[in-house]
Image (cartoon, grey):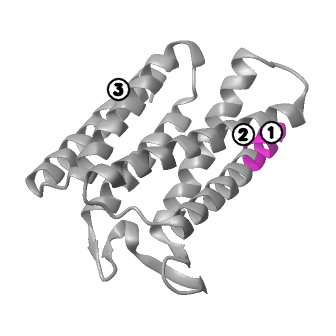
């Protein structure tokens, strides 16, 4: 499959699950996830615009799209704990209430901000520092990912003020940030190691 064919397949795949997910959330009057679909459309449109100059590899764009699918599924599939986002995978650490590790939501957070960090690393190497400064580029990629994750938490806060939602409190937010950092560190470290090999 050529890059153009992969890119076309990616757009069809992403558009299809956003359309189906959006229709599902509209039918169920789930305003929280209707808002998230709009945000996803904005993110993917921004990445497509940026792609003209960033030249992200197709596999990285597919990883980002898979996150979008994970998000749609997280808000639409029922489980014993509510929707999939609330699903408690395994009690690695359970301190009661929202302080529970490991949940589907936390896995999605780690995955997404790992992808964001790798995209940031690629962009920094492509646009700013093409050679050397390995530690600086690594740290900039991690900090960019954390900055984006902070904006996401602010967005979730504003959504929580306007519609009925499943956004958690302080413990949930801080656990999200911890998983965001862990995902960013692990993914960027792995990416750098694989590039060197």
Pick whichever, 181 or 124, lies toward us. 181
User: Which mark identifies residue 143?
Assistant: 2
Pick whichever, 170 or 11, lies toward us. 170
Alpha-carbon span between mark 3 and mark 2 = 31 Å
| Span colored in magenta | 189-197
Where is mark 3, residue-wise? 8
Q: Viewed as shown, does residue 97 lie left or right of 110? A: left
User: Which mark identifies residue 100?
Assistant: none
What residue appears at the point 20 percent right and 41 percent down from the top-left corner? 19
Q: Position of residue 134 (x, y in %)?
A: 88, 33
The verdict on residue 177 being magenta is: no
Can residue 173 be seen here? The reply is yes
Q: Are marks 1 and 2 in contact (CB under 8 Å)?
A: yes
What residue appears at the point 73 percent right and 45 percent down from the top-left corner? 188
- The image quadrant where one finds the N terminus is top left
- The image quadrant where one finds the C terminus is top right
Q: Position of residue 68 (x, y in %)?
A: 39, 46
């Amino acid at each position: 499959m050529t890059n153009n064919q992969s890119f076309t397949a990616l757009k069809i795949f992403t558009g299809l699950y956003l359309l189906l997910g959006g229709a599902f959330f509209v039918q169920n009057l789930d305003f929280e996830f209707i808002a998230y679909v709009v945000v996803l459309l904005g993110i993917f449109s921004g990445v497509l615009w940026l792609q003209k100059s960033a030249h992200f590899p197709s596999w990285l764009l597919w990883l980002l799209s898979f996150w979008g699918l994970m998000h749609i599924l997280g808000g639409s599939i029922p489980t014993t704990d509510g929707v999939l986002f609330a699903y408690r995978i395994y009690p690695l650490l359970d301190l009661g209430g929202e302080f529970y590790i490991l949940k589907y939501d936390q896995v999605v957070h780690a995955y997404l901000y790992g992808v964001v960090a790798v995209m940031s690393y690629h962009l920094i190497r492509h646009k700013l520092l093409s050679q050397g400064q390995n530690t600086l580029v690594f740290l900039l990629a991690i900090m960019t990912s954390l900055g984006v994750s902070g904006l996401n938490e602010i967005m979730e806060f504003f959504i929580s003020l306007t519609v009925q939602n499943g956004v958690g409190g302080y413990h949930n937010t801080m656990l999200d940030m911890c998983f965001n950092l862990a995902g960013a560190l692990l993914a960027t470290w792995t990416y750098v190691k694989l590039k060197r090999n």
